[in-house]
Amino acid sequence: MAYRLRWKISVDFVPPGEGLGQNNLPPLADTGGNAQTLTIFGSGGPSTPVSNTFLSGDVTNLLATLTTDASTQLNAALARVQGFASGGG
């Protein structure tokens, strides 16, 4: 038996008047509700620990891979995410 770590990160643009402190913001489902959303997923790579037990070192290695992967994908999508504010993206 082996283990794997799967992840996704969603970045939602919430329009003015629907943000923090407002009561009219609909719950954000996976579709983002009224928000424009960018969702990234793990792009593969080593996601299974070498051993059959889930150890502290496995968690550390998997999370290091996750942060590198997520950072790369989010930085590549910055222009698109910034375009959400002007109705683009």
Image: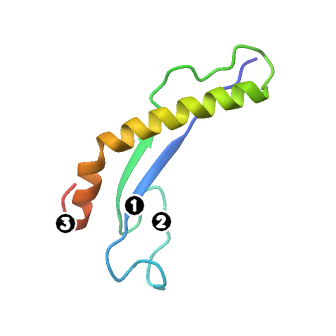
Residue 89 appears left or right of 63: left
Quarter of the view holding residue 50: top right
Which mark is first along the chain, 2 or 3? 2
Q: Position of residue 21 (x, y in %)?
A: 49, 84
Residue 7 appears left or right of 3: left
Between 3 and 57, which is closer to the camera in this rendering? 57
Say which residue label 1 marks: 12
Position of the N terminus, as image quadrant, is top right
Q: Nearer the viewer, mark 3 or mark 2?
A: 3
Secondary structure found at label 1: strand
Q: Position of residue 78 (x, y in %)?
A: 29, 49
Q: Is residue 48 above or below residue 11?
A: above
Q: Which mark is residue 86?
A: 3
Which mark is first along the chain, 2 or 1? 1
Position of the C terminus, as image quadrant, is bottom left
**Amino acid type indicated by mark 2:** Leu
**Few, some or many residues within 10 Å of mark 2 (<14, 14–19, 20+):** few
Give the CA distance from mark 3 to mark 1. Answer: 14 Å
Q: How many marks?
A: 3
- Residue at 46 percent of width and 39 percent of height: 70
Secondary structure found at label 2: loop
